[in-house]
Image: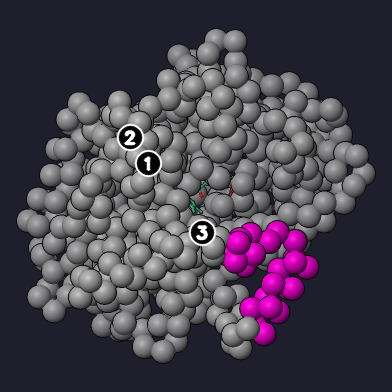
Amino acid sequence: MSHVVDFIRRVIDSAEDECEDLVEHLTGVDSARDRVASMQELEDAFPGAADVYRTLQHIEAPVSYRDPSGEISGWRYRNIELDWEPRAVSWAWPPRTFVPYDEVLRESSTSATNGARGVRVLGSCWGMSSLSHPRPGGNLLFRGEDASVEARAEWTDDGHVRALLGATFEEVLDVLGERGMTLRNQPGYASLSVAGCVGTGGHGSGVRASAPLGTLVTAVTIASPEPSVHEVTRFALGDSEFPRAVTHLGRLGPVVAMELAAVPAFHIAEHREIRRLGAGVAHAEQLLGDVLGVQLEASVHSAEIWIAPYADRHGDTVASVGIRRTTAEAPSEGARRPAVLRCKLLQTLSQMAAVLVDRVHPRWIRAALRQGVLATEAKKPVVMSSRDALDFGVLNRSRVGSIEMALPMDRAPAALSALLAALEIAAQRGHYVYSPIGVRFTGAGLGGTLSPQADRDVTVHVEIPTFAAPAFCADLVLPPLQALLASYGGRPHWGQRVYLSPGELRGLWPASSIAATARLVQRRDPGGHFASPLLDAVLGI
Ligand SMILES: Cc1cc2nc3c(=O)[nH]c(=O)nc-3n(C[C@H](O)[C@H](O)[C@H](O)COP(=O)(O)OP(=O)(O)OC[C@H]3O[C@@H](n4cnc5c(N)ncnc54)[C@H](O)[C@@H]3O)c2cc1C
């Protein structure tokens, strides 16, 4: 059997480069017209395939807006699902003019029927929760896709990197790379905007590696939420409101710049081993304890676990443990990550296969996920730049619906064990998740904030991703799992799906942090221009 698997891997490796063009063609087309054309080609070649593939595509709702130069541009909302057509205004920072900003604010406060409808500033539109939504009928403000025209990240005189409105981690890492520098940590997907990811309490991985990304920030600059008040406030490390300005949750006005600490570029040697996990808390405790323990070694940058959620006939679940050590070695010449982690073709095909399995015989998803996790094994370490090693390389062209819960370390084993049992029960009723469960570890986040890691020394982030298309029933499967993990003190990632009620959310952070956040919001935005239906109910404003 292993010969067959090796053979298939070799075929995939050799086909990979030739197939890159095809994958780019199918997944990388950006205009709606090009996509229709490529779907037609796909359909001609494999009747029925376009329908399957379309199920996986992220939401595409092109909007038109007039930018300051008077040109009409387009944008897609990716994971954001609004059921009305917002006015979407593009605004650059530093501004050539404040006109679009003032206009969108004034318009948002003059609804005769509804009071202030409000504005949301968007980063890269990957947010999955209603935190990315304004009040019904509200408007959107974002920086359009013009990074190639004008740089949105820059080096600062005091040796930091400044990410301007809309800049992604990718852009920041490019600027740093030119100087032989990098970030100590980054999210697993570098196309997220810095302000959107950090501001929702975003994280990378590693208990001693500045994984709560807010801990990389040295200053944050936010524009006034009032129309015609063209002022910005810079919150620097050490200021009393700095932690809450970093964890802004989109509620304090447009974050026009975030400055991040840089470190000299470094390399990481990554390997992955397979572990079997029996049922019961003791097994979960052993696994989480081992992976936490290894991260206390000086050379280890970070570690994470992927678990195939359904048990095999022996009652075992398989898990893949990835461990990353800093190293002075140069990046590996021949050795590469296992194909399943880097081959876009394989990832695209496996997403299509999941749709087919779901339609033909859903129970097969158990075996498919198990094989997917087993295929990540890499006994021989692969050396990469930290930038490549910390990026999971996931092709995210599909709409994802996931929840992620941040658990205190002492309750994480019981929570994980209960989660796996609950997934089995759901599966017996025909409801599955279509991706492995991800487990990452972080150290202390910024205290006194509503970030998931706030005021805890070690946090275990458990992510349950699945496809967002209605056929996969994410809204049926995920809410009870989120409630279950919340009962172990789990806090939701604000940028992923949030199904908990305001009352349930309030119980997950200290009352003093909620009150301090509410005070800052009311002081900065008394007109409620940046109101959030999700957050304001928690803050009680
Ligand atoms: C493929 C994928 C991988 C992911 N990996 C990780 C990961 O490794 N770690 C992690 O922590 N999270 C991860 N996430 C979750 C991600 O961090 C959140 O969804 C985050 O909110 C996305 O940022 P965004 O800018 O794309 O979102 P958006 O939806 O554009 O914005 C999110 C929130 O931030 C606010 N906001 C954005 N920019 C500004 C600004 N300039 N000023 C004021 N408010 C602003 C918005 O109003 C909204 O409330 C991942 C998501 C995806 C889709």
Residue 65, percent across and down? 83, 51
Badge 2 marks a residue whose secondary structure is: strand
Say which residue label 1 marks. 333
Q: Which residues are magenta?
A: 21-44
Say which residue label 3 marks. 17
Q: Report, in whole angstroms, how far the alpha carbon at label 2 lies from the one at label 1.
A: 14 Å
Amino acid bearing label 2: Ile
Q: Which residue is drawn at the image coordinates 75% and 32% (left, top)?
A: 150
Say which residue label 2 marks. 268
Quadrant showing the N terminus: bottom left
Q: Is residue 163 left or right of residue 181?
A: right
Amino acid bearing label 1: Glu
Task: Give the image quarter of residue 81.
Answer: bottom right
Q: Report, in whole angstroms, how far the alpha carbon at label 1 lies from the one at label 3.
A: 16 Å
> For the residue carrying disc 3, how many other residues have a C-alpha within 10 Å: few (<14), some (14-19), or many (20+)?
few
Question: Eyeballing the image, is 347 above or below 156?
Answer: below
Label whose residue precedes the other's in the sequence (2 or 3): 3
Q: Is residue 154 left or right of residue 299?
A: right
Q: Which residue is drawn at the image coordinates 45% and 14% (left, top)?
A: 238
